Amino acid sequence: MVLAADSPVWAARLRFQAPQLVKQLTQHLSGKRCTIQVRVRPPETTLVPPPLKPGIRPGIQGIAALQQVAQTVSDPELKTALLRLANRGYSR
């Protein structure tokens, strides 16, 4: 027999009581031998994702700094990403 407990504490208590349970089950089942295994299985719950926080937008100085850095970067993909980030600040 496999018993499922929803926490390690309850599993320990069941394991402690297992010999008495086996003895009672053996008497109840007319001498048939049985074993007990205890497993920890947390209760099935659906996790709710945390609410999304509003995006952080750069301030005026941050926008200027991003544009300035974008002009000095040689990598075109990084330059595009920096300019896109700077433009997010304008759409308030």
Image: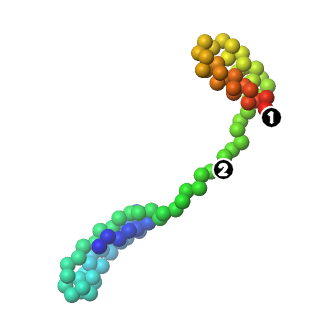
Q: Quadrant of residue 28?
A: bottom left
Determine whether, in the image, residue 92 is placed left or right of residue 25: right
Rendered-image quadrant of the C terminus: top right
Marking on residue 75: none
Marking on residue 51: 2
Which residue is located at x 21 percent, y 87 percent?
30
Which residue is located at x 28 percent, y 83 percent?
24
Place of residue 65 in the rendered image (x, y in percent of width and height, measured from the top left): 72, 19
**Which amino acid is tagged 1?**
Arg
Q: Is residue 19 above or below residue 50?
A: below
The secondary element bearing badge 2 is classed as loop
Badges 1 and 2: C-beta atoms under 8 Å apart?
no
Residue denoted by label 1: 92
Place of residue 11 in the rendered image (x, y in percent of width and height, measured from the top left): 38, 67
Q: Quadrant of residue 12?
A: bottom left
Place of residue 8 in the rendered image (x, y in percent of width and height, measured from the top left): 40, 63
Q: Nearer the viewer, residue 70 or 13?
A: 70
